[in-house]
Image (tube, grey):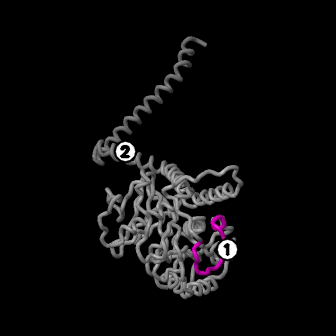
Amino acid sequence: MTDTDLFIAIGKPDDSVLTVVIVAVVVLILLVILLRHLIRKRGGWRRFRRRVGRELTLTRRAFGEPLRAYRRHRRGVRALARQLSDPRGGLLVRRLLDAAAAALADTPGAVPHAVRLEPGWASVQIAARRLPRPPEPWEAPAEPGPQRWELSLDDEDALPPGRTRAGAHLRPLPVAVGMADDACVHLDLAAGPRLITVEGDTAARTRLFLALAAQLDRPGSGASVIVADGVHPQHRGQRLDVLLRELETAAAEPDENPGPDEIGESGRTATTVLVCTSPTAEQARRLGALSASGAVVCLIDGRAAGHTWALRVDGRGRVIAPELELDADSGPLGRAVVAAVRADHRRLRRESAPRRATTAPRVDPLQEAPTEPIPQATAPVRTTTGADLLAEPDTARERTTAASSGTSVD
């Protein structure tokens, strides 16, 4: 091989690389020219940058939303479990509702029906045509929103005394329904028509319905829960017609001496709560009559005719009730109630264990004074517990309901 042949053999690869580079530069220049033409045609570089930035922001939010939703869910579970597991949590909510009711004694038609709790702060939502100025220590809300009074909880001694308005025969019956921002939302089931329906997405409403029933069945809730047949596949209760007949008979018997309740007020007894599902029109009429008399609070899975509070749940667990100005995320509620029920079991085991020494009890500003047992009207014996109600069904029920207004007719 001569030197010329060697030079030609070595130069061929360099020519190929140079050709590729030249072609790439030409294509790049053409792309730049085409991009400039398109950008000028669509409004210039500034508008193009804004549009690209907006698209990148939307893409980032779309990919990050599942992680943010998971973190919100975990925060909600922890916050709700912390409040529900605290033995004084339910008492604090009842005290707030009672104190707001006492402050509204001279305002006709004003009813406190919901409480939002967050660390160091509480607000009580009030249904009223015209909400009066709050008395001390209540404060007016600083931001727009539902009608409410707010109260700082940094100093427990500043909590108003718990007493109800004259003529109130039912104690507050609050249950947690979910999270609104960072606040735990509690709804007083005894503040309205006492006929509460849970409607909407089948799976989501079943989880919310069972979580509400399990809360009412916990110790210290102030409720005596009766569960009808058909509420849970693993629970066989009495038929709804039989329970209605027994409750109507019990309601007809006069209660001569109701006695004081847990906070020393006469005229109020423990509340009987009937948990049922999909009543017929006649059964709904009888349920409405019992709830209107104040003898029973009815919690219904599905739509029912009559004057009701309808809690509507979508597939993501968002529960709304426009007439109550309620909008909360009920997704974390189920796991939080499970944690609270387990805490109840652990507390009962500790209390039942023998103690080596006894000490004087600490005085608690939220402690209720012990009283004699409250005579109550005869009611059917409870046949299930909160833990049973939270057991996962073997098969999902396929009942469908349509969202209804406060008053619905079959």
Q: Is residue 242 visible?
A: yes
Residue 175 spot, x, y in % from top left: 52, 65
Q: Are marks 1 and 2 in contact (CB under 8 Å)?
A: no
Judge the density around disc 2: few (<14), some (14-19), many (≥20) Cα neighbours within 10 Å: few
Q: Indicate which label's residue lies in the foreground, 1 or 2.
A: 1
Place residue 22 in its image quadrant.
Answer: top left
Q: Amino acid at mark 2?
A: Gly
Query: Does residue 385 show up magenta in the picture?
Result: yes
Q: Secondary structure at mark 1?
A: loop
Residue 126 spot, x, y in % from top left: 38, 68
Q: Amino acid at mark 1?
A: Thr
Q: Nearer the viewer, residue 39 or 153?
A: 153
State left or right for residue 18 relative to residue 394: left
Q: Tell me where the magenta segment starts and ends, as one range.
A: 373-389
- N-terminal of the two: label 1 or label 2? 2
In this view, 219 is above or below 253: above
Q: Where does label 2 land, which residue?
A: 53
Q: Residue at x 36, y 62 (%)?
A: 149
Q: Nearer the viewer, residue 119 or 7?
A: 119
Q: Secondary structure at mark 2?
A: helix
In this view, 71 is above or below 188: above
Query: Does residue 168 show up magenta in the picture?
Result: no
Residue 396 spot, x, y in % from top left: 64, 69
In this view, 166 is above or below 96: below
Residue 68 spot, x, y in % from top left: 49, 50
Q: Where does label 1 land, which residue?
A: 383
Quadrant in which the N terminus is drawn: top right
- Furthest-top residue in this view: 3
